Amino acid sequence: MMVWCDNGIVDGKFMEGVVYTILTAGLPITSAQRVQGNQIGRQRQTAFDVWHKKTNFDWLLWVDSDIVLTNEALQLVWKSAHAVSRPIVSGTYFISKQMENSVMEPYPAVFTAVEGDKYLMSYVHPLPPNELIRVDYAGFGFLLMHRSVADKMREFHGDISFFIESMDDSNTAKDTFIGEDIQFFMKMREAGIPLHVHTGATVKHMKRFAFDEEYYKLYWITMANSMQAQARKEKEAEAQAPAPSDGST
């Protein structure tokens, strides 16, 4: 079963990715659920409850409405998941805190906890290429979850909401906001459920940025450096190639 949450509008690239992947993946995705609204915590909880309480599907695939799903990424996540040892596996996408800047700093939505302070976490950066790794937190943008996760969560925590955002208003010295996705993973850690991420299952995360002078300079300087590096490699390869034979003995 596939689920997504939106506010009434989705990116066309999202829909293209979903349709193409479902048509070509050859996986047993036979149902879909859409939850419309403007409160993401409630939307995710509704999707979670409907799947767990009103269906008998073993697997739930979460795809956010600004993610561009691909067959290749979904196959990697699907093959990495296991009902017992790896009941929840995330793909990889990138985020930034500078959402409207021309040169955003990209980091993977993959995190490790900082013990002793629930408000701190570290990016898994640099990201190890094409590996299945165990982590503490991720995003909900591209996530495959087995029914046993919901069973264990409710057995450990009771029938509560797992997606309530929180903030400690009394602590003004640092950022104490915890989003709905991290809240879920915190509760999952408490229940002893492992989270894995496949760093090779990367998908596009559709966000906006400004086409301004800074981006213009960054792009063309990067392109020039890349072309110069490629030219150097070709020259080195030519210098190391053996001289052609003239046929004489």
Image (tube, helix red, strand yellow):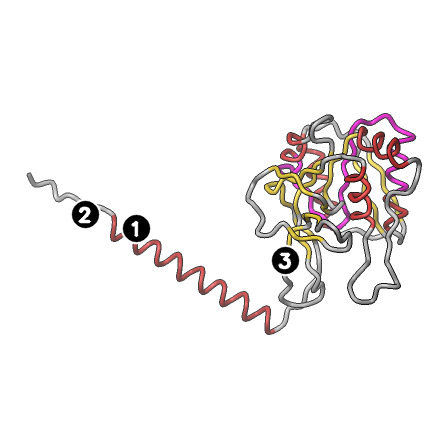
- Between the residue at mark 3 and the residue at mark 1, the CA separation in whole angstroms equals 34 Å
Dot 2 falls on a residue whose secondary structure is: loop
Q: Residue furthest bottom?
A: 213
Query: Which residue is pictured at 79% across the width and 36% down the height?
Result: 2
Span of residues in magenta: 45-74
Q: Which residue is mark 1?
A: 237
Mark 3–mark 2 contact, CB under 8 Å?
Answer: no
Give the side of residue 116 with respect to residue 165, left or right.
Answer: left
Q: Nearer the viewer, residue 240 or 195?
A: 195
Q: Which residue is mark 2?
A: 243
Image quarter of residue 157: top right
Residue 60 part of the magenta-drawn span: yes
* Chain-order first, disc 3 or disc 2: 3
Dot 3 falls on a residue whose secondary structure is: loop
Mark 3–mark 1 contact, CB under 8 Å?
Answer: no
Counting other residues with Cα less than 10 Å from the Cα at mark 2, is it few (<14), some (14-19), or many (20 or more)? few
- Between the residue at mark 2 and the residue at mark 1, the CA separation in whole angstroms equals 12 Å
Residue 232 part of the magenta-drawn span: no
Q: Nearer the viewer, residue 245 or 97?
A: 97
**Which residue type does callout 1 highlight?**
Ala
Return the x and y of residue 219 as percentages of the image width and height. 54, 65
Return the x and y of residue 107 as percentages of the image width and height. 64, 55
- Between the residue at mark 3 and the residue at mark 2, the CA separation in whole angstroms equals 46 Å
* Chain-order first, disc 2 or disc 1: 1
Give the numbered dot on residue 106.
Answer: 3
